[in-house]
Image: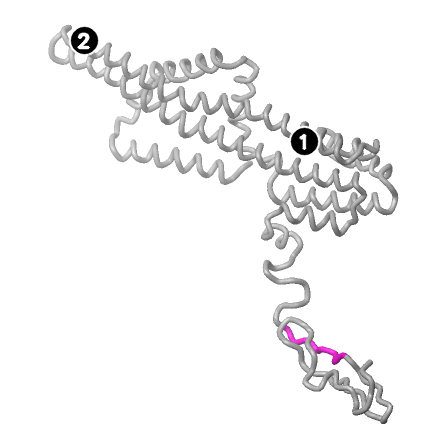
Amino acid sequence: MSRTTIAGLLVGISLFAGAILMATDNYLMFLSGTSMLLVVGGTLANAFISYQGRYVIAALKEVPRIYGHAVLNEGMTYDQSRKVIEWARIVQTKGALALERQIQQHDPDDHFMHYGIHLVVDGFKPVVVRELLTNSYHSAYDRAMRQVDVLRNMAGSAPAFGMIGTLIGLVIMLDGLGEGEGAEAAAKLGKGLSVALLTTLYGVVLARFIFQPSADKTQQRQELIKFRNFLMMEGFVMLSEGRTVGYVKERINSFLDPSIVAQMDGTPVGKSGAGGGGKAQGTGGGKGQGTGGGKPGGARGPGGPGGAGPGPGAGKPATGGTAG
């Protein structure tokens, strides 16, 4: 489960419900089947009219999925990028055909990874690998964005149908102005006004708590999948080019967030390997071998911060000697 998504929903509902409970004891007046029917029914009707039914159904299935675990996150993207580096070692030592067994170790539902490995194993040229994989991940992203478009449409339609319900409620209220007297007239006015205001409320709540967050979260996850596929595409192109392991690693890392790379590699950001302000001893260069019996000047001194440096007496050839 996505804890932050669920927490956000619970906080929003709690604040909304808490405000109602603090304002009135008759909280049941905020429940209206007629208003909910107008908003939900109108929103769904608009969606099915505007889009093909299968896209609407697929979009509605995405709503509960945003509360589950994401298929990918930045950490998973990093882990998969490390696989490309490992595959580069395999290709460099055993050849591209050795990648075929990697297919059995990967998720069978991950079409993109299987497709990329097949292209490399089958010996396609790098330019062809790039073209085919680019088409593949762009097409997958465009298909996923259809659900996002449907959800965004529903987020815009819900408040609109809330306003339609408001107009219906006002018509009912105005129609009852000339009928009845006293309590009976007030009851008719209250019924019409209740429908008028609650439909607007339901429309805004559904749009901002359900449909709009679902569209945004789905798009965010699809963009991360698109980036991961782009990263894998670059890896497969480099594998088909026969690039070295070092080049593959550096190019893959250049696309990733440095903080994520540092965290996963266990290296603090801004520090490299063994540097970091420690003392280092520098070996003086240029030992001289003199014909006149001079001593070589290989004195050792403390280096500068974070690296090696020559000592104060380093590198002086003996008198009459030739510097080596």
Q: Magenta stretch: residue 242 in it?
A: no
**Which quarter of the figure has residue 9?**
top left
Residue at left offset 30%, top offset 34%: 19
Circle 1: element type = helix
Residue assigned mark 1: 134
Which quadrant would the N terminus be assigned to in this image?
top right
Percent position of residue 133, x then y = 70, 31
Q: Amino acid at mark 2?
A: Gly
Q: Dot 2: within a 10 Å radius of its alpha carbon, few (fewer than 14), some, or many (20 or more) residues? A: some
Q: Which mark is residue 176?
A: 2
Q: Dot 1: within a 10 Å radius of its alpha carbon, few (fewer than 14), some, or many (20 or more) residues? A: some
- State left or right for residue 31 relative to residue 294: left
Magenta segment: 278-285
Q: Which mark is residue 270?
A: none
Which quadrant would the C terminus be assigned to in this image?
bottom right
Residue at left offset 74%, top offset 38%: 237
Please say if 300 is above or below 104: below
In three-dimensional space, the C-alpha distance between marks 1 and 2, rounded to whole angstroms, equals 63 Å
